[in-house]
Image (cartoon, helix red, strand yellow):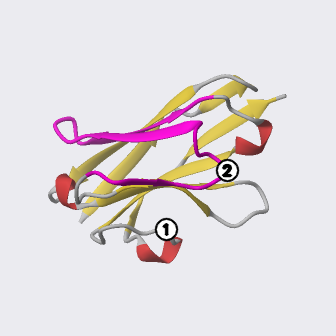
Amino acid sequence: QVQLVESGGGLVQAGGSLRLSCAASGRTFSSYTIGWFRQALGNEREFVAAMSWVGGGTYYADSVKGRFTISRDNAKITVYLQMRSLKPEDTAVYYCAATERRMAYGTGLYDYWGQGTQVTVSS
């Protein structure tokens, strides 16, 4: 079992930056692919970014490519999502999730989820 806790959300103006953190506990963290997802009000939860436990490969949704960066610190058992050039359409609750798969993009492929952190981008 893996427990995940997100933090770092908040209110930021368009063009600003935020760094989200996902702190993990439980089983061997380094053996899990960690993904970030977001859910805007009235929308389905969507994939944002993921980092594989195999070789640290990363994958991003087209909507955030070039603006968001996912990274992990296995020693601190934490995964980060650095968000730059934020837009109002990035407003959502952001969730981190874990899977034993090498890489996954669908919400149904992740087994463990955090409680989410709100990100609000004002125009």
Give the residue drawn at x 27%, y 70%: 100
Q: Is residue 121 left or right of residue 79?
A: right
Viewer-proximal residue among 7 and 32: 32
Q: Is residue 97 above or below residue 105?
A: above
Point 68% across, 32% down: residue: 86
**Residue ID at (15%, 57%):** 28
Q: In the rendered view, tell whether residue 24 sits above or below residue 123.
A: below
Q: Is residue 4 visible?
A: yes
- State the image coordinates of residue 9 (x, y, percent, origin top left): 56, 34
Image check: 103 left or right of 65? left
Q: Are marks 2 and 1 in contact (CB under 8 Å)?
A: no
What number is the disc on residue 105? 1
Report helix, strand or loop for mark 2: loop
Residue count near mark 1 (Cα–Cα under 10 Å), binned few <14, some 14–19, many ≥20:
some
Residue 63, label in figure:
2
Return the x and y of residue 36 as percentages of the image width and height.
49, 53
Classed neighbour count for the residue bearing mark 2: other residues with Cα under 10 Å, few (<14), some (14–19), many (≥20):
few
Q: Amino acid at mark 1?
A: Tyr
Sequence-wise, the earlier of marks 2 and 1 is 2
Choose between 17 and 2: the one closer to the eye: 17
Q: Which residues are magenta?
A: 56-84
State the separation of the CA atoms marked 2 and 1.
Answer: 14 Å
**Which quadrant holds the N terminus?**
bottom left
In the depicted view, which residue is nearer to us: 56 or 96?
56
User: Is residue 115 something that shows in the picture?
Assistant: no
What amino acid is found at the position of numbered circle 2 in the picture?
Ser
> Which residue is at a point 23% across and 50% down the rendered structure image?
25
For residue 122, above or below residue 4: above
Queried whether the magenta region covers residue 77, the answer comes back as yes
